[in-house]
Image: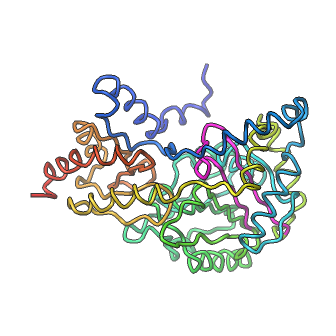
Amino acid sequence: MVSEKMKPFMENNSAIRAMFEEGKKMAAVYGKENVYDFSLGNPSVPVPEVNEAIMEILKTEDFNSLHGYMSNAGYEDVRQTIAESLNKRFGTSFSWKNLIMTVGAASGLNVILKSILNPGDEVIVFAPYFVEYNSYVRNYDGTVVVISPDTETFMPKFSEFEEKITKRTKAVIINNPNNPSGVVYTEETIKELAAIMEKKEKEFGTSIVLISDEPYRELAYGGVEVPFVTRYYRNSVVGYSYSKSLSIPGERIGYLVIPDEVEDSANLITAAAIANRVLGCVNAPSLIQKVIKYCIDHDVTVNVAAYEKNRNLLYNALTEYGFTCAKPDGAFYMFLKSPLEDEKEFCEAAKKHHVLMVPGSSFACPGYVRLSYCVSYEQIERSLPAFKEIAREFGLLK
């Protein structure tokens, strides 16, 4: 009954979701407060203005126009508001026609990949990377080419990247800030990526799209800036989600930016709008599109300081206990070196202390584990004795 194409997806079902489900079972047995679940990137910092926006919009908008169909690309006024916000922040020159409203960043990535990939085309990703990229590329019969991780800095290995670009390379995906490492690619990093890609475009006479997946763009700490890639590379497309910046992952709302500078941009924008429809999304959710406009108009943002406070508490404690970790500059993940070569075995051992982590092999980076610190500050405080016991168990702390 099940198609052959679906079987690999079933065999490699998300370890993140599996750990999340296990956490719910453990909470039922031991009590939620006694299970320290760091598996899922589910934002914990509320943005109450979102609810206020919904109530205000429901009072003022016509029912049929609010809940009815619109262009597959989304409401023009919403897209224009986002475009103007981006222009103000990043010195760009977008208009509503450069944006496609999408059902979250995941749908946006599927939209752009469907719009550009032919069977056999290659898409380059940098380990560690969000595992679902594999699925998204396979959806359109593309091939994922992985650049191995630099576990000292978690920045791209430029020499390997240059070697692995071929005439079949159609796209490169970066995730900035990065899930799972929390690193932020600097302006210098983006410039070097762009220079290599421009060189290879000329060498092969092809066009290579840089797809920047940016759901964590607003979550950067200590004055760290996240470069806006369209300023550095002509064939850039940006995918964004409000899941993290407004704490609304279940509402599934985001957008794609396709600049005029992209080769054949008018046709690509048309193709993306059609892809939005034929993938079955039809259009992004109407009410939440209007909520996004309201939030931009009212300068609504997430409380980044709360996540930074979580980061500092967890990072300082874990490094004090002897764990090794690159301090994250963005997102809300910590990528911890496993004291065991087999990090899956380490994750199993941590469960005995009611600590849930995701193995790094899920991100093409074995030997590491991911902790998601978008939990309550109190949960992190409660978890520290368990982490200390784990450190003692593995000889990191005497």
Image quadrant containing the C terminus: bottom left
Does residue 35 sit above or below 163 in this rendering? above
Does residue 323 sit above or below 118 in this rendering? below
Q: Which colouring convention does the figure follow?
A: rainbow
Residue positioned most to the left: 398
Residue range (magenta)? 236-260
- The residue at the point 41 percent across, 42 percent down is 39
Q: Of residues 275 and 320, which is closer to you in this image?
A: 320
Would residue 281 appear left or right of 363 to someone viewing this image? right
Taking the magenta stretch, the answer to whether it contains residue 222 is no
Residue 336 on image: x %, y %? 33, 57
Taking the magenta stretch, the answer to whether it contains residue 257 is yes
- The residue at the point 66 percent across, 74 percent down is 197
Residue 86 on image: x %, y %? 75, 65
Residue 208 on image: x %, y %? 72, 67
In the rendered picture of this protein, how many numbered marks are placed on residues? Answer: 0
Q: Of residues 159 and 277, which is closer to you in this image?
A: 277
Image quadrant containing the N terminus: top right
Would residue 276 appear left or right of 197 to someone viewing this image? right
Residue 342 on image: x %, y %? 28, 49
Residue positioned most to the top: 1
- The residue at the point 81 percent across, 64 percent down is 84
Would residue 343 appear left or right of 126 to someone viewing this image? left
Does residue 269 sit above or below 52 in this rendering? below
- The residue at the point 22 percent across, 36 percent down is 352
Would residue 232 appear left or right of 5 to someone viewing this image? right
